[in-house]
Each structure stands twice: as structure tokens, then as C-alpha cells.
Image: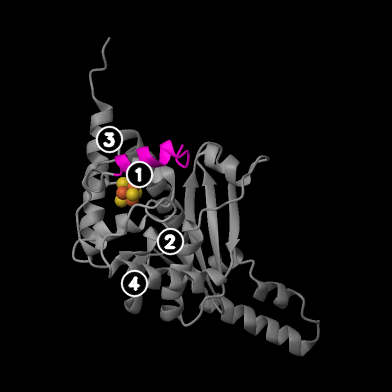
């Protein structure tokens, strides 16, 4: 018997509605700012988005929309779990260098008193912030970080859901050198904003979740990415002041797969360029 109810259409309509709400809430009125989450991606796409202020023209297909929605649900789940904790509960999960130091102090009365005081202070101070805004005026960049832990030190975490194939390329036995500059640059960008807001940033981490196996991995991102992000956005501002960037693999687009998912593909029309690069054997 044919399915009497179109669950696919119902779910896609729901996702479209949620995406519209998110677009209205986050981006309407802010079209002239670069998105921190675009760091490392196609410069030409950013030009359409931020300088020309075009609305996305080409929609992702339904399965891509569903995949992206799963990422959003995972973010909501982790952020919701964190928000449900009070500062003492948060402290239980804090494995920071501060705690290692506290656990190793020598045992005499003064140290015990200090240790208790420090623990009480840390408990009092420990806070978590989720989905906060950052705005870097001199680079014209704004965005939303995933998680910031604020205690005696400040740590940034960014959540990434990925499938088994990219997971294998990143962490598997046959892992390839990771040439993608996008994620470290994104974190470096958030770090600039967080440092402005919280007065310091002591570490940043990518928390990967494999959507197929539920295996997780936390990777530290070097703090040098903060300076790299500053230079990156400075260069983007400079490049866009000269007009629409030309098609050039590595920058516009940053990787070959990007055009296939681009919301401005019908405006950009990269097909002739792709054909030419394929004939040279540069594009596969
Ligand atoms: S179609 Fe490709 S090159 Fe053009 S803006 Fe999109 S990602 Fe960049």
C-alpha cells in the first residue's frame, strides 16, 4: 500500500520554517557583516553574501537539509545539557590545568586552606556560555560561538558533526594530512571576539562527533590561529575592496566540492572555469 502520509515533505517544510526563523533572527539586518563561520571558505561567496548582500539563491537538496538539521539537533542537545548544570556541577567536569595544580599542592594547613579557598572560588566562578555573539568591528566580522567555559581561565569549544568518510580521512588508519584551514580559522576568529569580551582566552578545542558511530574526539587548536585569523580577515577586506574576486581554486572556491553546495552557484556560474581546470587536469 502506498504511504498515506508524506512524512518527507512534512519534515522538509518544518526544516525550511526553522531555517527561515534562524535566518531572520541571526542575519536579517546584519547582511553587511562577514560571518565568522565563513572563515577559510570561498572568498567569492563571501563577496556575494556580504558586499553585494545577496540572499541565498540555490537551495541545498533535501538530504543535505536533513543532514544539516541533525548537526543543529546535536548542538542543541549538548548546549542544553550544559545549560542544565549549575556552577558546582560544571566544576565536576572541569579537568583544567588549574585543578591538576590544586590536586598536587603539598598537604599542610596553609595549603589545605588555600586549596579549599581556591576550589570554592573556582566553583563560584565557573560559568558556561552557549551560542554567544561575537563582533569584531575593525574586521567587520560577527558570529556565534558554540561554548565558552569561563572560570579562572577561558576556554572555547566548537562542535562539529561529521560522517564516517570524512572521519576516516581525518582520524582513521589511512588519514590524509588535513589541509583544511577552515575550522582552525573559524576558532581563531571566535577567539579574537572572545578575548575582547572576556578579557582572555586560554585554549580552544574542536569537539567532533561521528554521526554514524557516535564516537567523539576532542582536538586542541593552537592559539596561533588567532593571529592567523586576524591576518586572514584583514586580507579578505583588502581583496573585496578591489571588487569581486576572480575564480581561482584554493581561494574561490577554497576546495573543489564547495561549488556543488554553494547557494550562489547560479549567480557565480563557475562551470566554464571548472571545465577549463578539468582540461588542464587540475580539477577532478
Ligand atoms: S560557485 Fe564556487 S566559486 Fe562560485 S561562489 Fe560558490 S563556491 Fe565560490
Q: Which residues are magenta?
A: 270-284
Q: Mark 1 and 4 residues: CB-CB less than 8 Å, in contact?
A: no
Kindly report the distance in space between the C-alpha atoms of the residues bearing marks 1 and 3. 26 Å
* Pointer 4 residue: 238
Q: Earlier in the sequence, mark 4 or mark 2?
A: 2
Q: Is residue 215 visible?
A: no
Q: Mark 2 and 1 residues: CB-CB less than 8 Å, in contact?
A: no
Kindly report the distance in space between the C-alpha atoms of the residues bearing marks 2 and 3. 25 Å
Kindly report the distance in space between the C-alpha atoms of the residues bearing marks 4 and 3. 42 Å
Most extreme residue toward the front is 280
In percent of width and height, residue 262 lies at 31, 46
Quadrant in which the N terminus appears: top left
User: Which of pointers 2 and 1 indicates the residue nearer the eye?
Assistant: 1
Label 3 Cα neighbours within 10 Å, binned few <14 / some 14-19 / many ≥20: some
Q: Mark 4 and 2 residues: CB-CB less than 8 Å, in contact?
A: no
* Pointer 1 residue: 259
Q: Secondary structure at mark 2?
A: loop
Amino acid at each position: 500500500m502506498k504511504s498515506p502520509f508524506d512524512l518527507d515533505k512534512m519534515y522538509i517544510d518544518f526544516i525550511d520554517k526553522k531555517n527561515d526563523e534562524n535566518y531572520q533572527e541571526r542575519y536579517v539586518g546584519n547582511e553587511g557583516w562577514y560571518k565568522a563561520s565563513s572563515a577559510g571558505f570561498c572568498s567569492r561567496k563571501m563577496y556575494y553574501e556580504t558586499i553585494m548582500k545577496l540572499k541565498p539563491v540555490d537551495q541545498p537538496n533535501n538530504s543535505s537539509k536533513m543532514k544539516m538539521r541533525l548537526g543543529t539537533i546535536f548542538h542543541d542537545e549538548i548546549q542544553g545539557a550544559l545549560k542544565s548544570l549549575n556552577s558546582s556541577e560544571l566544576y565536576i567536569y572541569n579537568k583544567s590545568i588549574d585543578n591538576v595544580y590544586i590536586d598536587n599542592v603539598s598537604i599542610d594547613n596553609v595549603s589545605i586552606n588555600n586549596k579549599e579557598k581556591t576550589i570554592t572560588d573556582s566553583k563560584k566562578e565557573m560559568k558556561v556560555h552557549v551560542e554567544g555573539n561575537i563582533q569584531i568591528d575593525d574586521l567587520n566580522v560577527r558570529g556565534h560561538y558554540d561554548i565558552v567555559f569561563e572560570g579562572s581561565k577561558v576556554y572555547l569549544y566548537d562542535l562539529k558533526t561529521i560522517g564516517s568518510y570524512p572521519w576516516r580521512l581525518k582520524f582513521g588508519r589511512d588519514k590524509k594530512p588535513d589541509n583544511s584551514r577552515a575550522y582552525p580559522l573559524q576558532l581563531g576568529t571566535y577567539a579574537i571576539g572572545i578575548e575582547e569580551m572576556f578579557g582572555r582566552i586560554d585554549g580552544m578545542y574542536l569537539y567532533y562527533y561521528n554521526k554514524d558511530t557516535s564516537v567523539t574526539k576532542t582536538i586542541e587548536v593552537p592559539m596561533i590561529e588567532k593571529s592567523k585569523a586576524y591576518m586572514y580577515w584583514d586580507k579578505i577586506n583588502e581583496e573585496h575592496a578591489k571588487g569581486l574576486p576572480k575564480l581561482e581554486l584554493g581561494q574561490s572556491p577554497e576546495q573543489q566540492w564547495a561549488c556543488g553546495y554553494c547557494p550562489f552557484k547560479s549567480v557565480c556560474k563557475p562551470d566554464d572555469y571548472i571545465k577549463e581546470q578539468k582540461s588542464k587536469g587540475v580539477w577532478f
